[in-house]
Amino acid sequence: MSMDLGALRRDYTQRGLTLGDLKPNPFDQFALWFQQAMDAELLEPNALVLSTVSSQGMPYQRTVLLKYFDQDGFVFFTNYGSRKAQHIEANPQVSMLFPWYGLERQLAIAGTAAKISTAESFKYFSSRPRGSQIGAWVSQQSSIVSSRQLLEMQFEKMKENFLNQEVPLPDFWGGYRVKPISFEFWQGRPNRLHDRFLYRRQDGEKPWEVQRLSP
C-alpha cells in the first residue's frame, strides 16, 4: 500500500516572531509561550516528545508530561527501570520537543538530564491521584507484559496491599530534571519561510546568545 501525501499542505499565517518579541532569558520566553498554549486550550500543552539514545546509538522518542519548570530546568517523572531511564543513565544528553500545532509553533530544547532528589519526587508523588500512585507500583515500565488482564489483577492486588494507608513512594520511581543548553523557538510563517530563533548558553555576563536561523 502507498499513499501520496503531497497535497496535504497548510500555510501558516497566524503570527510572526521577531528578535524584538523575544525575552532575553529563554525560560521567560518559554513561560510566555506555555501560558499562551494553555490560554488557547490546546490538548495537553505540557506534553513533550523526549528523545534519548541507546547504548547502540539508536534514537528513541516518546511523549512525557512536563510537571514543573524553573530557572534550573524542566522536570518529568518516570520509572527508573524504564527504557528512557536506562538510556539517560548511559547518556544524559537528551532533547525535548513541544509540538504546539494549534498555534503553528514548536519548541525544541536540548540539554542534560539528571535525577532529582527523593524529597522532590516524594512531594510530587504525594500530589498524584491515589490510582496513579498505585499504578506506579504496578507498572514495570517497558518490560513485556502478557495481557491487560494481568495488569488489572496486579492493580487490584496492590490496592488491597495499601488499603487504609498512604501509598509510599516506590524506590524505583521519580523525576528527572533537564538542564537546557539550547532552546529553539519555531513559529510557522507563509511560504515555508518560518521564524526560527536559537538561544545558546554562553559564559560570562550575558548567559544566553540569540540568533535567527534560516528556515
Image: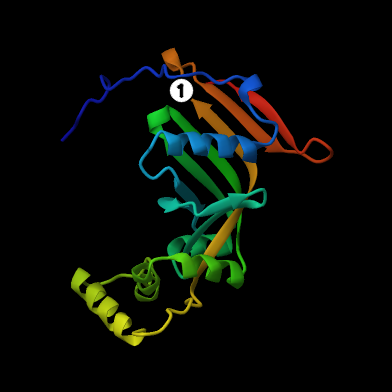
Residue at the limit of the structure toward the left, as seen here: 1
Q: Residue at x 49, y 61 (%)?
A: 77
Image position, residue 211 (x, y; %): 67, 26
> Based on the displayed image, in which of its 4 quarters is residue 197 positioned?
top right
Q: Residue at x 60, y 71 (%)?
A: 119
Q: Is residue 130 left or right of residue 115?
A: left
Q: Is residue 190 left or right of residue 73?
A: left
The quarter of the image holding the N terminus is top left
Q: Which residue is mark 1?
A: 188
What's the colour scheme? rainbow
Residue type at mark 1 is: Gly
Image position, residue 58 (x, y; %): 46, 52
Q: Residue at x 40, y 19 (%)?
A: 12
- Closer to us: 29 or 213: 29
How crowded is the residue under tag 1: few (<14 C-alpha within 10 Å), some, or many (20+)? many
Q: Residue at x 49, y 74 (%)?
A: 172
Q: Is residue 91 left or right of residue 169?
A: right
Number of marks in picture: 1
Image position, residue 155 (x, y; %): 28, 76
Instruction: Mark yes or no: residue 57 visible.
Output: no
